[in-house]
Image: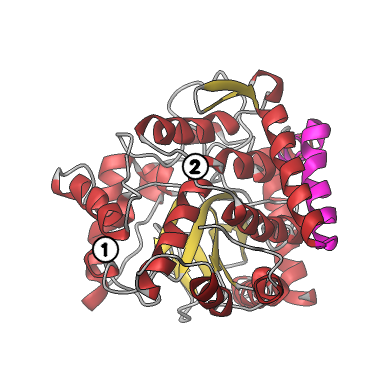
Amino acid sequence: MQIHFNNKQIKNNLLKGQFGLEKENIRINQKGALSKIKHPFNNPQIDRDFSESQIEFITNKHNSIQSMLNELIDLQKQSAEKLLNLKSGEEYLWPFSNPPQIKNDEHIIIADYHGDLAEKTVYRQYLAKKYGKKKMLYSGIHFNFSFPEELLKQLYKTENDKNEKYMTFKNNIYLDLSKKVTYYTWLIVYLTAASPIYDESLFNTKINKEYASFRCSKYGYWNFFNPILDYSSLEEYLNSIKNYINKGLICSEAELYYPVRLKCPVKTNLYKLKYCDINHIELRMIDLNPLFEEGIGFNDVKFLHFFLIYLFSLPPVNFGESQQVAALENEKIASELCEENIFLDLDGERVNIVNAGLDFLSGMEDFYKNLGFMDVLEIISFQKEKFLNPKGRYAYQVKDLFGDDFMGKGVVLAREHALFSANNF
């Protein structure tokens, strides 16, 4: 599909969209231990993740990133006000992706669901047995994005040269974008990684390498096989996931630990997805950033949006089996901290991550310059600086600030964030 981005209607809608965030945090007590108190909220937007002590904030869809962040701020304010006034004593939200000290696996209480939702507890028990409870406590941020319908309908009207249904056309756009995001996941991991330190109780072995993000490294969320997906159509894409379910390698699509997911307008299972249109893409590789009360910086969220639009503009990537294996390996490699020794496999070519990042961002700059979107350049420049001066990356800042006392300083920061949320947001 040849897109004419200078078409007035297309250009006017290009930077629009809908945005949402899902943010996970672990509740801790005043000593930094995992909370033993059951989930104290009765709000579907302040849910549980794997554990009773692991909160998940879920925003609605928003037409602007600032509005989305404002809702996240409000949810955190509600949370802080309640957690600071529990009868059992103050609780805070642990601000790091890596969990606090875990003295015993028994302290990790699996989320307890009842009635029609009881299967969610059974599923978590299955995950605990298969992957271990500790790994399930990694916390992060998922960024959700939808193209504006006006843009997609305009593209369908003017750029579609096939006799295909609108739903198929739309699904293929999201499928193509999913491929590209997975291919370039290494870039987002490099730019947003913020979890270089951890408590020794997290691992049963000595870690000999430094990481900027453990949850995106080989120690993070991964299946015990390399998933190869078929992007030729939505039906084949779904069939390739079903194949792993049928083989017993995963029990459901939710167990496919992949950096990107495609979502339907309504909550449904994999088998029904092909009967409705994809309406958003979910990016799952983003660390919690303790340097921001919200857990993520405004400039980083804006960049994610502009990154997706730029990828949308690029020609299709070659994404066969070898490229898919390399893409997931590149994500793990990008999670390492020593950038001068990080080399990616990009279509069989060994490229240093700094050079690859600068080349990508330069192309992104040219794209937005040619369209006259000059405000975007400031956001790109902000990210470019992380490649030009790597020691300014979030991972190094977090290491410098908290590396000498992860637990002690972590609890202090958690309380500061709680008080700030309750009193100022």
Res. 324 in view: yes
Which residue is at 46% across, 61% downward?
A: 173
Residue 383 belongs to magenta span = yes
Percent across and percent down for residue 148 are 57, 75
Res. 52 in view: no
Picture quadrant of residue 93:
bottom right
Q: Secondary structure at mark 2?
A: loop
Q: Is residue 168 above or below residue 101?
A: below
* Between marks 2 and 1 in the image, the one whose residue lies nearer the viewer: 2
Picture quadrant of residue 414:
bottom right
Percent across and percent down for residue 373 are 80, 63
* In-front residue for pair 285/187: 187
Which residue is at 50% across, 28% downward?
A: 347
- Which image quarter is the C terminus in? bottom right
Tell me which amino acid carries mark 1: Leu
Q: Which residues are magenta?
A: 372-399
* In-front residue for pair 260/17: 17
* In-front residue for pair 399/226: 226
Percent across and percent down for residue 287 are 60, 48
Disc marking residue 270: 1
Left or right placement of residue 270 versus residue 24 in this view = left
**Disc 2 residue crowd, few under 14, some 14–19, many 20+, Cα 10 Å:** some
Dominant secondary structure (helix, strand or loop) of the stretch shown in magenta: helix
Which residue is at 79% across, 41% downward?
A: 384
Tell me the distance, in whole angstroms, between the alpha carbons under discs 2 and 1: 25 Å
Tell me which amino acid carries mark 2: Val
Which residue is tagged 2? 317
